[in-house]
Each structure stands twice: as C-alpha cells, then as structure tokens.
Amino acid sequence: MLYRLLYQLVLRWLPPVAIHELAAKGLAFVLRAPGARRLVRAWAYPGLRGLSVTVLGQRFPSPLGAAAGMDKEASWFDALGAIGFGAVEVGTVTPLPQAPNPGPTIARITAEGGLLNRMGFPNPGAATIAATLMHRSGETLVGVNIGKQRTTEISRAVEDYRSLAHTLAPLADYLVVNISSPNTAGLRELGEVGALEPLLSAVQAEIADTAPGTPLLLKVSPDADDAQLDAIADLALALELDGLIATNTTVDRGVLRQAPPWSVRRLDGGGISGRPLKARSLAVLRRLYERTEGRLTLISVGGVESVDDVWERLAHGASLVQAYTGFVYGGPAWPAGINHALVRRLRAVGYSSIQELIGAATSGGN
C-alpha cells in the first residue's frame, strides 16, 4: 500500500529507466547489510516445501520468476531472488555490448497497468555477463536469455546464437532463445519454422558440446496465429526442446482499451507488456499446453499482476510463471506477497504443493 502511494505521488513522474536503475542499486545496497539477505529470503518464501516446483532438472523455491528484461546486465539477480522471485532470467544477452535503440525507449501506460518499450536488447555483452555468472553464489536460479546482435544480418543469426550458447550455456540454469522481440528489426522472421529449425538445432549441438544437460527453451510471440503456434509447438516436440516461454511483448495496439492516444504515440514502435497482454498470453498458454499435451515445460509471462493470475496460469498448464510489469507497478514487496498468497490458497483448497496445481484446470490435469 505504501509503495502504491509512493508510486502515485512521486515515482510515476520520474523517467522509467532512472527508476529501474535506482531500484536495482538501492535493493542491492540494502541487502548487503550483514544477515539482511538471509532474513529477507526467509520471509519471502513461506511454506517452502509446498511453494517449490521441481522442473527443468531444478528445484525452484517459488513458481514466480523475474522475466527477461528485469536484469539486463546480470547485476541484481541475487537481490531479486532474495525478495521472492524463484528464478531470474537475465538478458537478453547479445555477443557484443549493445546500447539501447536510439531515442525514447520506454513509456508507462499507467491507465492500463502496462508498459510500452523499444529497448532493443541493451546489455554489456556475452563476455561481461559470463564473467559475472562465473562468480555467482548459486543462491538464485538464473536463466539466460540470448538474442542476435542488432547489426547481424538475419542470414547470419545462427552464428550469434551458437556463439552465445557456447559462452553462456555452461553458466546458466537454463538457456532461452529469443526470436520473438519486436524491438530488433527482422528478428521475428526467425520465428518461421523454416528458419527456426536450423537455428535451434545449432544451439542444441553447441549445448551438447559445451554444457550437456542445460535445458533449452524458446520464447514465443503473442502475435503468432494459431497455425504458427501449432507449428512451433510441433517443432519443439520434434527437436525435444525442454520448454517454451509464452509470451513476449505484443505490437498489437488493439489490446489497449483506455490509454489516451498520446501515451501510445510517445514511442515509435515497440512492444506492449503488462495487463493489456493478459488475455492473449493466457490464450497462447492454453493453446500450447493443449498442442503439446503437457509434454513440454511451459513458462507463462504477460499480464501477471496478482495471485489470481499466477494461480490461473499454473492451473492451465504453466509449470512456472514470470513477471516484469506487475513488479514495476507492485513494488519490492510484491513477489513475497504473491508467495504468501499462494501458500494461503494452497492450504485453503487442500493442495499440499504447487506441483499438484499444474494443469489442474485442463482436461489433462490432475
């Protein structure tokens, strides 16, 4: 409640990028106090046994994770893990350092609980990220999201992804191929099955050589139609990928209902996240779960604001749920609040663990 008041009175008027950087540095600083991280973690993960999920060969202390984009530089994943995120997906990482797209890159759509961004994979590059991950404590599960360099031709994109897998797969708890961001010109062309199959096969081959057993997932677009989603699901099964992440941001302005036109025009292009994406993200999850018959790990992201959203995604087949915009509007206590609410609801309905909930609302559920 206090954070929401602070947001309404002060934070909403400050530049989003500056607030993000301040939050990252401030939280990391506070948790460096002796014993602070251990105490905060103990509070953030109540009823740990029932809250945890075992998937992708890992035990996630909570099904709620931080989506890619939250920690682009791999600079505060331990702090995010301490406050209640069961895993943090860093990146998107490119082979070389990359600045944000020119011009304004992010705008709030406060009236609809959304964000509009055209960041374009800003990050310090694979070598720097690898150096950081090499010395991590292991306290927080870390996925690594990878994407091609902005200047790399689509015809040579496979080289970027293979190079990234070589450098980062040995240091990641799971690896995610991102071909679905709308903020890198031409990137979504790689989502066509004809281009996707050789790319994923090359990444799989690199993982087999350098980091056997590292789970590989693909992040999909909410703007894909049902036929495209089915084709991607079928390919993922054929290649024996470990999972799919649904979804990235959307370029569909039709998801906006209340935002004034000027708030959308502030950025040329870009993808929408948050509440406006909620319905489509859930629809994509349900489609993929039905198509794959529960044989792939599904991670749902897009419009996750409350315990109701997390519960719904799990019940409809997601093994894990990620958030970004919900945390921006909810504040630092938000992930722990979700965890506490999940535990209360588990007890209320008589489940002993989150694992029992996964897929329960589907015909193939428990």
Image (cartoon, helix red, strand yellow):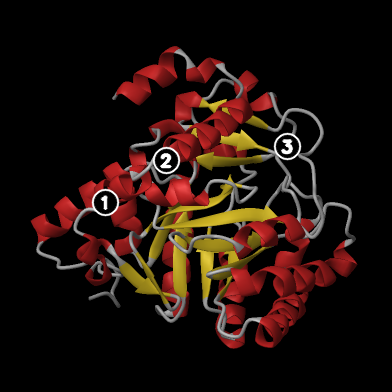
Q: Quadrant of the C terminus?
A: bottom left
Q: Residue at x 65, y 37 (%)?
A: 117
Closer-to-camera residue (39/348)? 39
Q: Residue at x 49, y 35 (%)?
A: 29
Across and down, in percent, residue 256 comes to: 53, 33
The answer to whether any part of residue 112 appears in the image is yes
Mark sitting on residue 225: none
Taking the image as shown, residue 50 lies to the left or right of residue 128, namely left
Q: Amino acid at mark 2?
A: Leu
- Whichever of callouts 1 and 2 sits on the residue coming sooner in the sequence is 2
Q: Residue furthest front?
A: 34
Picture quarter containing residue 50?
A: bottom left
Please tell me which residue is depicted at 33% across the width and 62% down the height of the picture. Answer: 61
The answer to whether one can see residue 180 in this image is: no
The residue identified by callout 3 is 269
Residue 100 in the image: above or below residue 152:
above
Question: What kind of residue is marked 3?
Answer: Gly
Q: Nearer the viewer, mark 2 or mark 3?
A: 2
Badge 1 element: helix
Residue at image mark 2: 31
